[in-house]
Image (cartoon, rainbow, N blue to C red):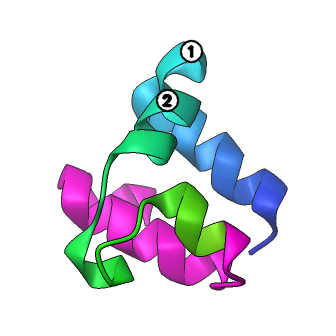
Amino acid sequence: MRHSEFWKRMEAALGASYASSWAHQQAITALGGRTPMEALEAGVDPQQVWRAVHAALDLPSRDR
């Protein structure tokens, strides 16, 4: 998954105005206590970050 696809999914799940804010503030245990933004900046694969976000938000399986 590319970063652009990650952000597209984030915006679909949280809305365009809230996705970036949430990704900068919400620490996720599955990402080692990092925020999605910190994980992406550290080089974590966007697909792995998305899976962690998906689980944290308890999104429907169709959104995986």
Q: Give percent across and percent down for residue 11.
A: 57, 32
Disc 2: which residue:
21
Quadrant in the picture for the C terminus: bottom left
Q: Nearer the viewer, residue 46 or 25?
A: 25
Q: Residue at x 37, y 59 (%)?
A: 62
Classify residue 34 by image quadrant.
bottom left
Label 2 – label 1 distance at C-alpha: 8 Å
Residue 51 lies in the magenta stretch? yes
Image side of residue 44 versus residue 21, left or right: right
Q: Residues within 10 Å of mark 1 (few under 14, many from 20)?
A: few
Above/below status of 9 relative to 39: above
Residue 50 is tagged as: none
Q: Residue at x 34, y 61 (%)?
A: 54
Q: Residue at x 17, y 55 (%)?
A: 58
Disc 1: which residue:
17
Q: Residue at x 58, y 57 (%)?
A: 37
Above/below status of 38 relative to 12: below
Image side of residue 50 versus residue 3, left or right: left
Instruction: Report the magenta stretch's main SS.
Output: helix
The amino acid sitting under disc 2 is Ser
Span highlighted in magenta in the image:
41-64
Q: Give percent across and percent down for residue 7.
A: 68, 46
